[in-house]
Amino acid sequence: MAAEVRSLTEDAVRSAKGERLRRVWWDLRGRHDEIRVPDERAMAWAGALTDVRLVLAQRLGVQDSADAERLEEVAAASSDEVSRALASLYLALSWLQESLIEAMLAEVPEAPEA
């Protein structure tokens, strides 16, 4: 059943992921001293960052939070240059995603007290 559902939705999911990455690429074109994410594209950015982080996590063998925490050591001291670069990128994207989510949450109005 799961395989059947996946086969029905796989193209749409792949297309959505590609579109999010294209939007981020479009926003990043040119040279920037700082990154400003337009409010209307914040969700696309968050999704694209998640997609890239998931790919990096898979390549780095990240299965849980303990694995993710070890990436700081990999980024700082791994003898494998590729692993060091991927871990550094994963950590940078994690920081960027956390910053973006915090900014998005700051825009959410507080619920009125009951």
Image (cartoon, helix red, strand yellow):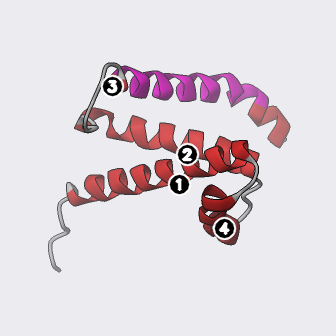
Callout 1 amino acid:
Leu
Q: Check the picture and name the quadrant holding the C terminus.
A: bottom left
Whole-angstrom CA distance, mark 4 to mark 3, is 31 Å
Residue plotted at (22% across, 59% down) = 106
Q: Which residues are magenta?
A: 7-26
Q: Earlier in the sequence, mark 4 or mark 1?
A: 4
Distance (Cα) linking label 4 and label 2: 14 Å
Q: Is residue 26 left or right of residue 82?
A: left
Residue highlighted by disc 3: 27
Secondary structure under the numbered disc 3 in the rendered image: helix
Q: Which residue is mark 4?
A: 70
Q: Main secondary structure of the magenta part?
A: helix
Compare residues 37 and 76 and report the one nearer the observer: 76
Q: Mark 4 is on which residue type?
A: Arg
* CB under 8 Å between discs 1 and 2: yes
Q: State the residue at coordinates (76%, 34%).
A: 6
26 left or right of 109? right
Residue 81 x, y percent position in the rendering: 70, 44
Toward the viewer: 52 or 105?
Answer: 52
Q: CA distance from mark 3 to mark 1?
A: 21 Å
Give the residue type at disc 2: Leu
**Element class at badge 1:** helix
**Mark drawn on residue 89:** 2
Return the mark for residue 91. 1
Q: In this image, 5 relative to 113: left or right?
A: right
Judge whether residue 25 is colored magenta.
yes
Whether 2 is drawn above or below 69: the answer is: above
